[in-house]
Image: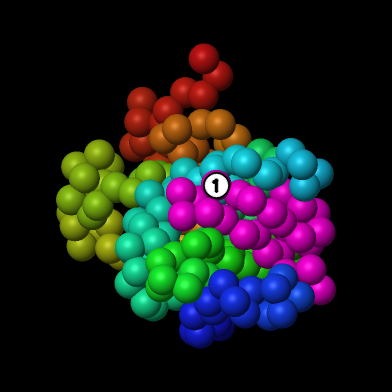
């Protein structure tokens, strides 16, 4: 969305004005990705007061499923690779709740050309209707498809998923393709982010575990995946 680099002498007139008046969530980060300031929209998205957000690492607001990927992109930005970070269907982690949306970041440089700060913008996606549609009995996941989705959210590659679920690689890809169509997303990263944003996973559980209400009763699938589901009750 933003492609221009803004130097420090233009900061007060351009960036700060946009930061204070924009209706989208905006945060200013230093080169170490520590939050220096946020606007009211970002504070509302987080469910916290601005003073509770400042001085915290921006990594805390990235969902574990996408944290390392996004941090690598930010690292390239700080190292003065000029392209802005634009990630669609990224899951943010606000007040113990996953929120899917679009994250955009671009550098603000000082007079010497070094990155002085980073402007990060987050625009949530509306998912309430999608969540309601999926919970319907016709759209719940089978036990096996749920295991595939859990593996995708954990970042498991196809070969590892195939070994875990006693499927061929083609079988895994078949189930992934079904999930991509069902969730109307283009790739695995977007699939995991959307599932998190819809509240399908148990909070604080790793590896990810889909809540029972999203799984269609299926004796055969349950028998096949018995013993593979992580226990988050401990």
Above or below residue 78? Residue 52 is above
User: Where 1 falls versus 148 (above or below)?
Assistant: below
- SS at mark 1 in the image: loop
Q: Which of the two residues, 225 or 105, is positioned nearer the viewer here?
A: 105
What span is in magenta?
18-46
Q: Position of residue 138 (x, y in %)?
A: 62, 61
Coordinates of residue 18 in the picture (x, y in percent) = 73, 76
Query: Residue at point 36% right, 58% down?
Result: 75
Q: Position of residue 196 (x, y in %)?
A: 56, 51
**Quarter of the image where the N terminus is located:** bottom right
Q: How many marks?
A: 1
Query: In the figure, is residue 157 to the left or right of 201?
Result: left
Does the magenta-highlighted stretch encompass residue 32?
Answer: yes
Q: Is residue 103 above or below residue 169?
A: below
Q: Is residue 19 left or right of residue 63?
A: right
Q: Measured from the top left, where is residue 4 in percent x and y? A: 51, 84
Above or below for 189 versus 141: below
Q: Residue at x 47, y 23 (%)?
A: 231
Q: Nearer the viewer, residue 84 or 162?
A: 84
Choose top left, top right, bottom left or bottom right for residue 84: bottom left
Q: Label 1: which residue?
A: 34
In the picture provided, is 17 more to the left or to the right than 125? right
Outermost residue toward the top? Answer: 234
Question: Closer to the camera, 181 or 187?
Answer: 187
Question: Which residue is drawn at the image coordinates 66% and 69% (left, top)?
Answer: 123
Task: Evaluate whether residue 168 shows in this view.
Answer: yes
């Amino acid at each position: 969305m933003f492609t221009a680099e803004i130097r420090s002498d233009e900061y007060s007139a351009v960036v700060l004005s946009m930061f204070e008046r924009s209706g989208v969530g905006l945060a200013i980060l230093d080169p170490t990705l520590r939050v220096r300031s946020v606007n009211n929209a970002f504070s509302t998205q987080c469910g916290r007061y601005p003073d509770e957000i400042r001085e915290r690492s921006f990594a805390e607001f990235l969902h574990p499923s996408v944290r390392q990927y996004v941090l690598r992109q930010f690292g390239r930005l700080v190292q003065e690779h000029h392209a802005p970070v634009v990630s669609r269907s990224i899951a943010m982690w606000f007040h113990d709740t996953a929120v899917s949306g679009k994250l955009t970041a671009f550098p603000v440089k000082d007079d010497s050309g070094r990155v002085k700060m980073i402007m990060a913008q987050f625009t949530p996606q509306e998912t309430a209707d999608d969540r309601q549609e999926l919970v319907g009995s016709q759209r719940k996941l089978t036990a096996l498809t749920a295991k595939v989705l859990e593996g995708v959210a954990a970042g498991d590659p196809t070969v590892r998923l195939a070994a875990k679920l006693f499927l061929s690689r083609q079988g895994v890809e078949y189930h992934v393709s079904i999930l991509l169509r069902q969730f109307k997303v283009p790739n695995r990263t977007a699939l995991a982010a959307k599932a998190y944003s819809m509240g399908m996973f148990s909070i604080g559980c790793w590896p990810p575990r889909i809540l029972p209400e999203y799984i269609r009763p299926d004796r055969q699938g349950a028998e096949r995946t018995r013993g593979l589901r992580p226990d988050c009750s401990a």
